[in-house]
Image (tube, coloured by chain):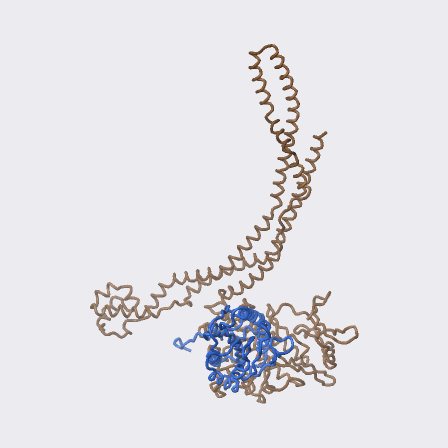
Amino acid sequence: MHAVAGAPKLVAKIYLKPPDAAKVEKLRLMIRGQSPGLLGVAAWPVELLTDERGAVRGFLMGRISARQDAHRLYSPKSRRRTFPDADFRFVVRAATNLARAFGQIHAAGHVIGDVNHGNALIGKDGTAVLIDCDSIQVRERTRNRFYTCDVGTPLFTPPELQGKAFRGLKRTEASDRFGLSVLIFHLLFQGRHPFAGIYADGEMPLERAIAESRFAYGAHAESLGMLAPPGTLPLTAFGRPIARLFERAFAPPGGEEERPSAIEWIDELRDLEQRLTACPRRPRHFHPRGDSCCWCDVELRTGAKLFEDGQTANAESDAVTAQQLWQAIEGVQPPKPAELPDFAAEELRAINATSIWTRFAEALAQRAPPLLFGGILVASVLSLAATASVHLLFLGVMSAVAIAAVSFSKRTGNSRLRRAMRIEWQNAIAQWRNHSSAGLFSGARSQLEQARRSLGILAEQQREELERLERLLEPRQHEAYLDAFEIDKALFLAVLPAHIDQLAIRGIRTAGDIRRHRGMVQRLVPAESAAELRNWALQCALGFKFDKLDPTYLADAAKVENSYRQKRHQYLAELRRGPELLATRRDEVANARARAEGVLRRKHEDLRKRREEQKQ
Amino acid sequence: MTTFDQVPFNNVEFADNPEPRCACLLLLDTSGSMEGAKIAQLNAGLATFAEQLRADSMASKRVEVAVVTFGPVKVVQNFVTADTYSPVPLRASGNTPIGEAIETAVRLVSERKQAYRANGIGYYRPWIFLISDGEPTDDTAAASLLIRKGESKKSFMFYSVGVENADIGRLAQIAVRQPLRLKGLSFGQLFVWLSDSLSSVSRSQVSDAPELTNPAAPGGWAKAE
């Protein structure tokens, strides 16, 4: 399978070894026979691909958008991961669409032949598409010639063809009708195969069961030695008409009734979908209206979760989604550490180049005026007690000091300027560093990490909250449970009927009453009877188990689940936006750095000019 | 069904995933002689095995893996579907009680088949895959009988692989199928082959023996004897 450059809606299938003449003929026929109907439900060939010598090497067909193998929808385990939001309405719709796809192929006179769990694909919208179409059995109407399918999958092959070689085998629509019914059975009965049942008499391989038409759910199953597996629904769970279609599909071949056609399935499945209603206890259990909820029943009998109401399943699929989203987030390269531009490094060197002596002189110059005045003061004091020669010396020293002072004052001015420039530059660098930081990016990144962590512990938090609810409701349920045990229905040794009457007069009638009014029981009946009653109440309490189907619990639990669903969506949305957000932040960091560098460059120019001026 | 009907818990896994099962029991020699490179390669091979099976969405629902090591004989992993199988690193020590190990393996496989049957789950013929580098240190007569019976009744397929200096002649006495000798320490290739084979089995029909690629062909993991 290859993508086609410039044709995003097509893919190319290239054979490993060039197809033989008959295959090429078949492909040509299929391409001639293409129609919008067929192209809509199948990866139908639309054009041949030839090599430079003109030999056929493959063909072009429509690209199938993201879809999943049908088996991922029908078994509860993979449905939780692949179709976490699918309830039974979705499953029925997918089954109907599958029948529609079969119907399209049959209407054109073709037979799919190799029906199996892997070449029917289901999309997120419940639509079905058939793939591997080059194996379809095609009929050329004018010459009534058949191009056979040559492959098959035994578990979807009808009894009359079991064990036969598929090469050159001419199939009829009846064989597809069997396969379609097996697929629909898998979808409606949660991944079960119609012929997989319990056989009392040793081994019963599935192929043999099919070959011998031992439909494990049928009305005659028991007479064939078959029992439906434990924890499965009866065939009539979705109504008699559907059960009839399955009975017809899986009856021994050659009977009076034909296997149901795609059209019959479409009609009945559409009807079923309209009859589905939400379970009052589990809003995600859609079951046929008028009956009790079949999914609650199966869940109760098997302990499996068929259609999740958003706990463990979400935790599983969240982990997968979060992992995928996180990979995309990690794919966004963080900005590189900011590097000082070359000119700035140069400027820094220029500034640092001032020698130690110059710096010393500068430091001295800073302190020159106080030194000067100090010197004059000392000299004046000394000169008071001095002779004329000393006076002369004093004058000399004074003039030398005056000259030094003048020259110093000039240097001081220069050095002040330079120092100011250096500080200015250091500030500019600090500012540049500040504006070039990748903080904007790493901030967003750690926020995303936080969202991911929060998502990871969400399921756990939700579970804790539900447990808290349970603990809150438990005492009330416990009392109600004990009140179901009536004293006058129990068998006692020491408690006499008269005692029971005594208690009843005071309104003490149940095990719950005994627990609530221990003191009164003690007063009303002899100690021995009271002890037996207490003991009995304790015994009753042993059987208590929290009932999760309690309407109050269900209502509160639904609220909890809803709030967590919202949080989950929020976090997932945040993670989903992650890569884009990070890319934006990275651009922003890059822009800020460009701006900061510009500012720094202007500062550098400015300082350089001022230095030049100062030299002149 | 009424409230008082018994609800066996093993229903869950089959209700959750009713696909037909292909059981594969790995019977692995972890005796002292396997220490060093051999056990390291074996562990790496197991990791590849688990990874490969998980990558195949159908095989991961249909193939079930169990691991029994010896000696002493220990059930390291009872049957789980490949999507949940994750290998624990094995360490080498002890002797080579192949006989007892085979008896345990056959028992586990037959128990598992019972569970499939009781729950109306279709299944492929189970595989027992023995890998050993030594000679049995216990009596293998009973084990050999079990294998002969199992193979003739098509209850399971028993494959054996000898590592390095393993006594292939001795293995051949125990098994029905010709034992293969591992080329060097190509455990990696062996487990890739095994997962590929199981994947293709899990797509094929339930009762027929699958056509496998010949592991002794050039580029394969086995050496022809």
Above or below residue A388? Residue A317 is: below
Above or below residue A154? Residue A486 is: above
User: In which quarter of the view is residue A43 placed?
Assistant: bottom right
* Outermost residue, top side: A388
Taking depth in this image into account, of A144 and A317 the one nearest to the observer is A317
x%, y% of residue A261? 61, 81
Above or below residue A242? Residue B48 is: above
x%, y% of residue A427? 61, 38
Taking depth in this image into account, of B194 and B18 the one nearest to the observer is B194
User: Which color is chain B depicted in?
Assistant: blue
x%, y% of residue A453? 51, 57
Chain whose colour in the figure is brown: A
What residue appears at the point 45 percent right and 72 percent down from the top-left corner?
A: A303
How many numbered discs?
Answer: 0
| Residue A78 showing in the rendered view | no
Location of the N terminus of chain B by quadrant is bottom left
x%, y% of residue B125? 53, 81
Above or below residue A36? Residue A476 is: above
